[in-house]
Image: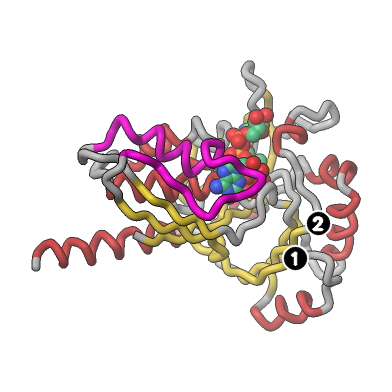
């Protein structure tokens, strides 16, 4: 089974409070984009979870793919949980585009089918939030207005523009931004209708720019071309463009030191399209 594992953008990110456990209450709109990692799953009979190729900075047991597989083992309904997983990364780590959370959700969705756990999506999302606040939206697979720590989701239909996504040459630690004493944590909550009509801002932007001169420089550059935004806690910035041609023109004029991609927003996660297709095909195979 081969599945794409997409990135997400936070169209805005308001921090509305802080919980007893240190986690933050937030409001955001999540949109998926068609920029994806790829995961390929093959069942084996050796009761081992193997992930390849090796990622130097990330020991296998700390990979969220491994952790996602591990938490699903108690729910398997086939004999062996042996699984070989090929993880082809394209999404930069620590970019604020949720690559790790997306990979975890893709793994939960794939193994739920391959191990015949047959858990409802809501249960997978509940297991997923223990791995990361962004996992539930990738499990549910729809664009969403999110509250809580990002796990209380209301489905929304969004425009699906062409985006220019830019990665300044630095890595931002989500934990470090959320523990910063200057982070604003008192943005008044807004209603979903307000969010959809008027959008919002990203409460992390000023702090991320302050500690990361590369983000600051890239933000000021992208702002010359329109309404530049930071996704999550960065480091990635994005700009909605009028069309592909517009995005390409800006990309061509961009300093070469930054990585960049042109992608499209989507209202349904590409993982869900591919998984449903796989299930349909395998139904046909079984029927034969
Ligand atoms: C910033 C966002 O990307 C917005 O979508 C997410 O809220 C972050 O989600 P994530 O990367 O899956 O975050 P996690 O792996 O759960 O948390 C990383 C660290 O960020 C902080 N954290 C995260 C989410 C949240 N709502 N409040 C927090 O305070 C916590 O210190 C935590 O230790
Ligand atoms: N499969 C994975 N892919 C990427 N990072 C992973 C993975 N598994 C664990 N991690 C760890 O998670 C950290 C955050 O990765 P991720 O790519 O999700 O960052 P991010 O885009 O900033 O996420 P977010 O927007 O959710 O904060 C990485 O620095 C890495 O140490």
Q: Which residues are magenta?
A: 47-76
In the rendered image, which quarter is residue 220 located in? bottom right
Specify whether residue 121 is painted magenta: no
Give the numbered dot on residue 103. Answer: none
Cα separation, mark 2 vs mark 1, equals: 8 Å
Q: Position of residue 180 (x, y in %)?
A: 81, 29
| Circle 2 SS class | loop
Label 1 neighbour load within 10 Å: few <14, some 14-19, many 20+: some
Judge by depth and name the residue closer to the eye, 264 or 37.
37
Which residue is depicted at the point 65% across and 53% down? Answer: 11
Give the numbered dot on residue 259. Answer: 1
Which residue is depicted at the point 21% across and 39% down? Answer: 79
Q: Position of residue 199 (x, y in %)?
A: 67, 52
Q: In the image as oriented, which residue stretches furthest toward the front?
A: 46
Q: Locate ligand 2 by image quadrant.
A: top right
Q: Which residue is mark 2?
A: 169
Judge by depth and name the residue closer to the eye, 77 or 270.
77
| Circle 1 SS class | strand
Judge by depth and name the residue closer to the eye, 151 or 256.
256
Up the image or down, 31 lies above or below 148; here it is: below
């Amino acid at each position: 089974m081969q599945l794409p594992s997409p990135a997400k953008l936070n169209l805005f990110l308001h921090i509305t409070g802080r919980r007893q456990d240190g986690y933050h209450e937030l409001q955001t709109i999540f949109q998926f984009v068609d920029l994806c990692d790829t995961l390929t799953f093959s069942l084996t009979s050796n009761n081992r979870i193997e992930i390849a190729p090796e990622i130097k900075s990330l020991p296998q047991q700390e990979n969220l793919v491994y952790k996602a597989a591990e938490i699903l083992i108690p729910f398997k309904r086939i004999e062996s949980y042996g699984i070989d997983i090929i993880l082809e990364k394209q999404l930069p780590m620590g970019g604020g585009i949720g690559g790790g959370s997306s990979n975890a959700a893709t793994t939960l969705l794939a193994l739920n089918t391959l191990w015949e756990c047959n858990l409802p999506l809501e249960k997978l999302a509940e297991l997923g939030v223990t791995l990361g606040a962004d996992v539930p939206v990738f499990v549910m697979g729809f664009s969403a207005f999110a509250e809580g720590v990002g796990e209380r989701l209301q489905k929304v239909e969004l425009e699906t523009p062409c985006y220019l996504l830019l990665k300044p040459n630095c890595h931002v630690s989500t934990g470090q931004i959320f523990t910063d004493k200057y982070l604003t944590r008192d943005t008044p909550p807004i209603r979903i209708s307000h969010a959809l009509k008027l959008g919002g801002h990203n409460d992390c932007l000023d702090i991320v720019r302050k500690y990361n001169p590369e983000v600051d420089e890239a933000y000021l550059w992208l702002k010359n071309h329109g309404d530049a935004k930071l996704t999550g806690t960065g480091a990635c910035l994005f700009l909605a463009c009028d069309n592909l041609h517009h995005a390409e023109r800006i990309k061509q004029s961009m300093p070469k030191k930054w990585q960049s991609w042109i992608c499209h927003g989507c209202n349904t996660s590409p993982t869900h399209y591919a998984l449903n297709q796989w299930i349909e095909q395998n139904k046909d195979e079984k029927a034969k």
